[in-house]
Image (cartoon, helix red, strand yellow):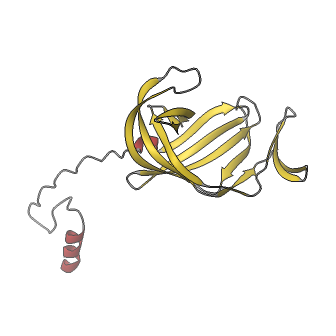
Amino acid sequence: MKKMLALICTTTTLLSGCGGGGGGTTAAPLPPPVALPLAAYVGEWAGECADHQRDGVVIKAVGNNALSLTARTDYYDKADCSGAIVATERSSADIALTYVSSADSSVALGPGVAAKTIKVDQVNVVVPASTTTLSGSAVSTVTQNGVQLQCVSYSNGERACANTQGGQVGGSGPGGLYATATDMYTLISSGSGYTFEQRFSKK
C-alpha cells in the first residue's frame, strides 16, 4: 500500500499533501485557464432562415488552435422556418479550421450594412471530399431528364429538388471568423480584406 501511495504522489498533481497524519503541504493555486484563440466559436449555431431552409453548425475545439465544424441544413414545412422540420441535409465529412492570426479589417457584416473595423480571426479552411445525404418525412426520389434527384415536398404544394448523387470535391483556402456575444460571422477572404458570407446565432 505504501508503494502504491508513493506512486500516486509522484505521478499526479499534488492538490493536497501526500502521506498521513500531521499537516500536509499547502496546495499551490491552479493557474487561470488559457483562452484559446478560437474558443468563442465553440458551440452550436443556427443560421438565418432562407425560404424553408436554415443552416446549422456544431463547432468543437481540436487541440489548442483548431476547430471541427459539422454542418447541416434543416428544411422546414413553412417558408419562414416555423413549424416542423421535414428534412435534413448532412455532409459525410466535417470541415477543419486552423487558426492563423488575428488582424483588424473593415468589413460590412451583411447586405446593406455599413462597413466597420473588426478583429478578424484568420483561419485556414479545409473542406474534405464528401457525400451529401438528404433524409426526412418529406423526402422523395424522382428522375428528371435521366438524372436522379432527391426532393423535399412542402404542404403548400411547393417542392425543392437537388442532385445529391456522387461526391463533393474537397479543397482548402483562407477564410475568416468574427464573433460577438450572440452571433458568429463567417467571412470570405477577398484580396487584402474580407467579405461577408453568413451570420449564425448562438443556440
Residue at the spot x=11%, y=61% of the render? 24
- Out of 179 and 31, give the one closest to the viewer: 179
**Quadrant containing the C terminus in the rendered view:** top right
**Quadrant containing the N terminus in the rendered view:** bottom left
- Out of 165 and 103, give the one closest to the viewer: 103
Q: Is residue 147 above or below residue 53?
A: below
- Out of 27 and 30, give the one closest to the viewer: 30
Point out residue 71 in the picture as x, y percentages from the top left corner. 60, 47
The answer to whether 28 appears left or right of 97 in the picture is: left
The answer to whether 65 appears left or right of 142 in the picture is: left
Residue at the spot x=55%, y=32% of the render? 196
Number of numbered labels in the structure image: 0
Point out residue 162 in the picture as x, y percentages from the top left corner. 78, 46
Outermost residue on the left side: it is 22
Residue at the spot x=43%, y=52% of the render? 66
The answer to whether 129 appears left or right of 84 in the picture is: left
Point out residue 166 in the picture as x, y percentages from the top left corner. 74, 58
Residue at the spot x=73%, y=31% of the render? 51
- What is the quadrant of residue 45 in the picture? top right
Q: Is residue 146 above or below residue 161?
A: below
- What is the quadrant of residue 117 in the picture? top left
Point out residue 165 in the picture as x, y percentages from the top left corner. 77, 56
The answer to whether 109 appears left or right of 93 in the picture is: left
